[in-house]
Image: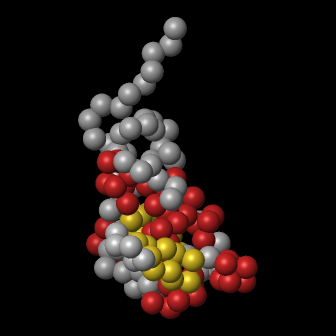
Amino acid sequence: MEKTYVIKGKPESKWVLFDASRQSLGRLATQIAFYLLGKHKPDFTPGVEMGDYVVVINASQLGLTQRLLNDKNYYRHSGYPGGIKKTSLPEMMNNHPDRVVRAAVWGMLPHNKIGRKLIKRLKIYPGSEHPHAAQNPNPVA
């Protein structure tokens, strides 16, 4: 019987840069979630926070299909009766393009303590400028 490998200590985290211009939202979100979870590393261990920090630039230039722009809505509820609010995707892209990417990535992460820690490692910017040049993020092709 083979023993299961479990990494000891806290693994080193790197910084990764994604350019979201003209990319599909779902495909971009799966790649980001993959890097946040650390599944690209050969010593990946489930349940251990070992992913990288992810910087996303050009979030306002996502390549979205016409059907998605027509049909996709974001909902939130205040907790009061009749307190549901609906925001369409074009409206969300105009006001908060970072929230569109964050919502897509959050749907692909585990909804527990680890997932809440991982989503904090995601930094999203609508333009091409970001304040993380000192971390020297490696661009992902």
Give the answer, above or below, for where 107 lies relative to 101: above
Q: Quadrant of residue 119?
A: bottom left
Q: Quadrant of the C terminus?
A: bottom right
Count of numbered circles on the image? 0
Q: Quadrant of residue 125?
A: bottom left
Residue lying furthest top? 1
Q: Nearer the viewer, residue 109 or 74?
A: 74
Q: Where does the image place residue 69, in percent across and percent down from the top left?
A: 65, 83
Residue at figure coordinates x 58%, y 87% from the top left: 90
Give the answer, above or below, for where 72 lies relative to 26: below
Q: Where does the image place residue 56, in percent across and percent down from the top left?
A: 46, 73
Q: Quadrant of residue 99?
A: bottom left
Q: Nearer the viewer, residue 55 or 111?
A: 111
Residue lying furthest front? 81
Q: Left or right of 58: which side holds 63? A: right
Residue at figure coordinates x 52%, y 8% from the top left: 1
Q: Nearer the viewer, residue 15 or 64?
A: 64
Question: In the rendered view, how is the structure colored?
Answer: secondary structure
Q: Where does the image place residue 110, in percent across and percent down from the top left?
A: 44, 49
Residue at figure coordinates x 45%, y 80% from the top left: 85
**Is any part of residue 140 visible from this angle?**
no
Q: Where does the image place residue 4, in percent across and percent down from the top left?
A: 45, 21
Q: Left or right of 30: which side holds 128? A: left
Give the answer, above or below, for where 123 lies relative to 97: above
**Is any part of residue 118 visible from this angle?**
yes
Residue lying furthest left? 9
Residue at figure coordinates x 55%, y 64% from the top left: 29
